[in-house]
Amino acid sequence: GGAEGGAEDEDLAKTFAAAARAVARNRAAETAEPVDQVAAYFKSLIEEWERELESKPADWVYSNAGKQSVANCRLCKQHMRPLFKRIKRRELPVDIERALFLIVKSMKERNYRKAADMYIGIAVGNAAWPIGVTSVGIHERSAREKIGAQTQAHAMHDEETRKYLQSIKRLITFAQRAYPTVPSLSLDFNSGYNGWDKDALKAADEVLDIRAQVPALLALPANGDGWKSQDGDTRTWKSLLTHAYDGTEHAKGGKKVDIDKIRTMKDEIIARDKGMYDARSGHLTRDPKAHSHDR
């Protein structure tokens, strides 16, 4: 009995020590540059996900659901490494750097629906995607080549970027269960992927009223229709990125950024293979060899 009690005390001490280190890192990250805050937050979520899986019983770990969760966590950690390296070397395109900060900011506020909107903005942007019928006869529609998924230089054209963006989507899903919020601020609430949001929400609400735990709800006006005010931000994607760092220490005394004049992910993709870019139309060509003579 004494040996078992000693082992339990040791495990409890390790858990408290890990939690204390996480709190210390989070406090240090609050004063760091925005891009370093992004890295620190995502690293802490990955560590938390790993600790949760380690605490699971062996029967669950070897079940189909357990194997899938462990594989997802490992894959997520592996795919996030290139992002952390780019952040450390300050090689991240400015548009992605600012969009990731907006995602992290929304996740900390437990507004996962807004974080998902930011994710869509960074992954697809304003690229034109084919919706509905694009060819209704023997003749091709006018400017048909401009609306194919392969004709836009968005982030998903880059393999490395695509992998870490998908991993960030997984972390949003995990955070929604680890730090639950109300259904209206959730992404695919209680979908069953990576656990059940409803169970986590009920458990958190039993400890403390969930409305007192969600920063996004606390920030709403006390009177009037608070739910409508959540959708009050109608700024363009360019405006959101331009003002992403407003209110942070990094923004104080800094120069205003012109999003049109900074290096973006699209610039990186085009620079990597200039033969894919048609200067006349401003779109990627279907056939990379079409402009090989320009090289």
Image (cartoon, rainbow, N blue to C red):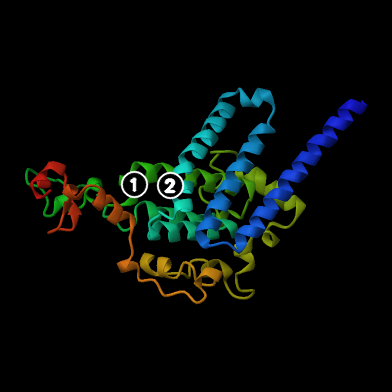
Q: Is residue 140 visible?
A: yes
Measured in 3D between alpha carbons, the distance from the residue under mark 2 to the one under mark 1, in whole angstroms, is 9 Å
Residue 63 x, y percent position in the rendering = 60, 23
Left or right of 230, for residue 17? right
Q: Which residue is drawn at 34% across and 50% down?
A: 155
Provide the secondary structure element on which disc 2 rests. helix
Res 11 quadrant in image: top right
Residue holding disc 2: 165
The tag on residue 202 is none
Please rate how many residues cluster around mark 2, counting C-alpha atoms within 10 Å: few if below 14, some from 14 to 19, many from 20: many
Residue nearest the viewer, comparing 52 with 113? 52
Asked if disc 2 and disc 1 are in contact, CB closer than 8 Å, the reply is: yes
Provide the secondary structure element on which disc 1 rests. helix
Residue 134 x, y percent position in the rendering = 18, 48
Left or right of 55, for residue 11? right
First in sequence, mark 2 or 1: give its number. 1
Q: Which residue is drawn at 88% across and 31% down?
A: 5
- Label 1 amino acid? Met
**Above or below, comparing residue 217 to residue 51 in the picture:** below
Residue 139 x, y percent position in the rendering = 7, 46
Q: Pick the quarter of the image with the N terminus.
A: top right
Q: Residue at x 48, y 66 (%)?
A: 231
- Label 2 amino acid? Leu
Residue 289 x, y percent position in the rendering = 12, 42
Q: Residue furthest front?
A: 89
Q: Can residue 287 be seen in this view?
A: no
The tag on residue 156 is 1
Residue nearest the viewer, comparing 196 with 22? 22
Please rate how many residues cluster around mark 1, counting C-alpha atoms within 10 Å: few if below 14, some from 14 to 19, many from 20: many
Left or right of 72, for residue 58? right
